[in-house]
Image: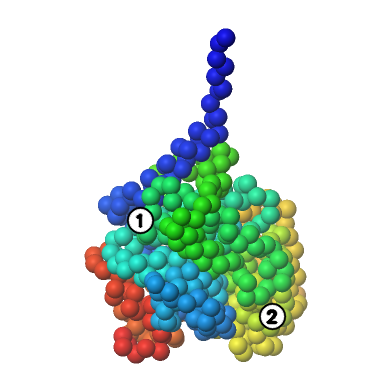
Amino acid sequence: MGTCTQPPDIGTATRAVASRDFTAFLHDVQFKDIPEDVRRFARRWLLDLIGVAAGGTCTELSRIILDHATSQFGAGKHGARMLFDGRFVSPAGAALAGGMTIDALDGHDGHKLTKGHVGCGVLPALLAISDAEGRDSGEEFLTALVLGYEIGSRAGIALHRTASDYHTSGAWIAVACAALGARGLGLNSTKTREAIGIAEYHGPRSQMMRCIDHPTMLKDGSGWGAMAGVSAAYLAADGFTGAPALSVEHDDVADLWSDLGQRWCIFEQYYKPWPVCRWAQPPVRAILDLRTQHDLSAADVDHIEVTTFHQSKRLAVRQPRTTEEAQYSTSFPAAAAMVRGGLGPEDIAGAALNDPEILRLSNGMVIKECDAYNDAFPARRFAHVTLHLRGGRQLTSTRTEASGDPENPASDAEIRAKFHAWAEPVLGQGKADAIESAVDRLASGSTTPLFDLILSNPKDASHD
C-alpha cells in the first residue's frame, strides 16, 4: 500500500520564515547597517520626545503616575530610573511612567496608518531596559531606537488590518517594546518569539474612540503598552511562553514585514507642533494661516466654521475642564489659536481653560464633516475653515493638512526650537542646552551623559 503524504502547510511555513526574518532583523542589525539619514531622524524624534516629556512633567497625570510607579513597582534586582524623576522602580514601572508622562502632553510624533504613536512607548521602554541592564553604548541605543520605530509602525498597521475595533497605540506598541527588551536582554530566537507573543496577547486592547468621546487620563495607552512589552521580555527570559504574535506571523500581514531594512518607517512619522490630538491640527493650522494672512485678532471674528473629517468632529468637548479634555477637542484648540496666535502647553491648561474669549469662539464654532475628507482618512487628514467676521465678511482657507506631515517634514531648526520652548520652562536653559548637545553626540560615546540629564529630577540643579 502506498504512503499518503500530506501537502505542506503553507501558512505554517510562511510563519516560520516571518519569525526568522523578524528575529534576524531585530538581533543582527548594527549601527553601521543604519543609513546616516535614518540615524539623523532617530536623533530628531529623540530630541522631540524628550522635550514633550519635560513639558509633560508639569501635568497632574504625570505626577500621579510617577508616584504610582514608585509605590507599586518596586525596583527589585534591576531597577531603572524614571524619566525626569530619578527614582528607581522596576523597568516595567519606568516604562509605564515614562510613556504616560510623554502622552500627558499630546505633542509627540505619530504615524498616519497606525492612527497612533510609536516613539511615545518605544523611548521609555528602551530607556528602562538600557538603564536597568547597564547598556550604555550610544550607537546601540540609537540603533535600537530605529528598530523600535520600524517594528512599532508595522505592528500598528498590522493590528488595524486584522482587528475590527480601533485600539489605542498601547495595543501594538507592546510588540515593539518586547522586541527591544529581547534585544537588550540578549534573548535567543525562541525566547524572542515568546516575548513578542506575550506582548501582543497582554497589550492593552483599549478602545481609542471611547477616550475620544470621554477624555480622561487614559489617553492613548502608550505607557501601558510599554509596560506590557517590557514585562513580556523579562517573562520570556524566565521561560514564560506566549507565541505566536499574529500581528507579526500571520499570512495576512506578511507583506508588512517583508521589507525590513529596506523601507524605513521612521521617515513616515509626522511631527506635531501643537500639544493636541492630530485630528484637531488641520483646523488649527488653517486658522493660524488666515489670522496671519489677514492680520486679524479674535475680536474681528463673530464665529468660526470648520469642515473636517468624522474623527475630528468626534473631538467634541467645547468647554474643557482638564488638559486631557482640551487635548481631545477640535473647537477649543482652534479657538485658542485664534485668540492667542499660537498653541503651546500653556494654552490647554490652567487659566486658558477659563479664558472667556476662547470659550466664546469654542462654544460658537460650527463643525461639519465632509465625505471627501472622510474618504481620505487616515492617509490624509484634511480640513478647511471659514472665519465669519463681525460685519458679515467671510474668509475661507484652502484645504489644509496639519504641519509636519512626512510629505512636508518640519526642519531640524523647527524641531529644536520646539524642544527649547517646551523644555526650558521646566529644565532651565542650561540643562536644555546640555540635553540637546548630548543627543547630538550620542553616537560617539556612552549614553551616560544623556541618561544622567533625563533620568533625573528637573529640580536637580547639577546641570544648570
SS at badge 1:
loop
Residue 330 vertical placement versus 161 (above, below): below
Residue 242 vertical placement versus 18 (above, below): below
Point 24% across, 67% down: residue: 445
- The reply to whether residue 12 is in sight is yes
Question: Where's the C terminus, which quadrant?
Answer: bottom left
Mark 2 neighbour class, 10 Å CA radius: few under 14, some 14 to 19, many 20 or more: many
Q: Is residue 107 left or right of residue 37?
A: right
Measure how far apart labels 1 and 2 are at the Cα level.
46 Å
**Could you tell me residue 327's position as x and y percent?**
62, 74
Mark 1 neighbour class, 10 Å CA radius: few under 14, some 14 to 19, many 20 or more: few
**Could you tell me residue 293's position as x and y percent?**
56, 72
- The reply to whether residue 66 is in sight is no
Q: Pick the residue in front: 306 or 104.
A: 104
Depth check, mark 1 against mark 2: the one in front is 1
Colouring rule applied to residues: rainbow
**Could you tell me residue 102's position as x and y percent?**
50, 73
Q: Pick the residue in front: 319 or 394.
A: 319
Point 43% across, 76% down: residue: 75
Point 44% across, 85% down: residue: 426
Q: Going by the picture, which residue comes out furthest to the left?
A: 444
Amino acid beneath label 1: Gly
Tags 1 and 2 touching, CB below 8 Å: no
Q: Which mark is residue 272?
A: none
Q: Which mark is residue 320?
A: 2
Residue matched to label 1: 186
Image quadrant assignment for residue 7? top right
Amino acid beneath label 2: Pro
